[in-house]
Amino acid sequence: METLRWILVSAHVLAGAAWFGAMFYSLTLVHPRARSFFGEARKLEEFITYLAAGARWKVLSGAGLIAVTGLALWCWPSPAKPVSATASACVWMKLVLFVLALGLFCVTSWVWWPARLMAGADEVPRFQRRFRLVGLTLLTLVGLSFALALLK
């Protein structure tokens, strides 16, 4: 049974790390390099749209894996390590951070992304700034969640 628990822990941590890593890579390498390569805002938007096509469902699948494994781990605590008050508080804070991150992702994905696609040339820089801020916020939320996991 302990082996199954470690599989759940591994899946949970790896899914969270993949989400964090993908955002970090996108924010620190892909977008800045694409911006300098394309220069022209419209070409950059075409590239980002092409790159992001279908990503929504991959992110939501990963978030689902994080949620399912997190719930399973919460419902099935380790007999070798009882749940302390600190660990419980960390899990609740991680849940809050996860819900905030997922909510922000959904608003961005279903509201702001379509608006960005329909934006006029004069509106594109505003959307690019907003998406950088959203990316930094998501990176912070997921990073804080990792930090809380270390505390428990």
Image (cartoon, grey):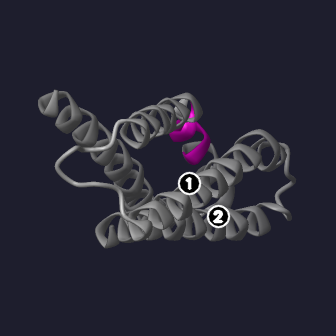
Instruction: Tell me how far mark 1 sits from mark 2, CA to CA.
Output: 19 Å
Tell me the residue that label 1 is attached to. 95
Residue in view at x 70 percent, y 49 percent:
103
Query: Is residue 59 among the parts visible in the rendering?
Result: yes
Q: Where residue 143 appears, x then y in whole percent? A: 42, 67
| Horizontal side, residue 115 vs residue 39: left or right | right
Residue in view at x 62 percent, y 61 percent:
40
Q: Which residues are magenta?
A: 48-53
Q: Quadrant of residue 127?
A: bottom right
Question: Which numbered mark, 1 or 2, is in the foreground of this view?
Answer: 1
| Residue 50 drawn in magenta | yes
| Residue 18 drawn in magenta | no
Tell me the residue that label 2 is attached to. 134
In the rendered structure, which amino acid carries the disc numbered 1?
A: Leu
Q: Earlier in the sequence, mark 1 or mark 2?
A: 1
| Horizontal side, residue 27 vs residue 18: left or right | right
Above or below 99: residue 11: above
Above or below 127: residue 18: above
Q: Where residue 76 appears, x then y in whole percent? A: 35, 36
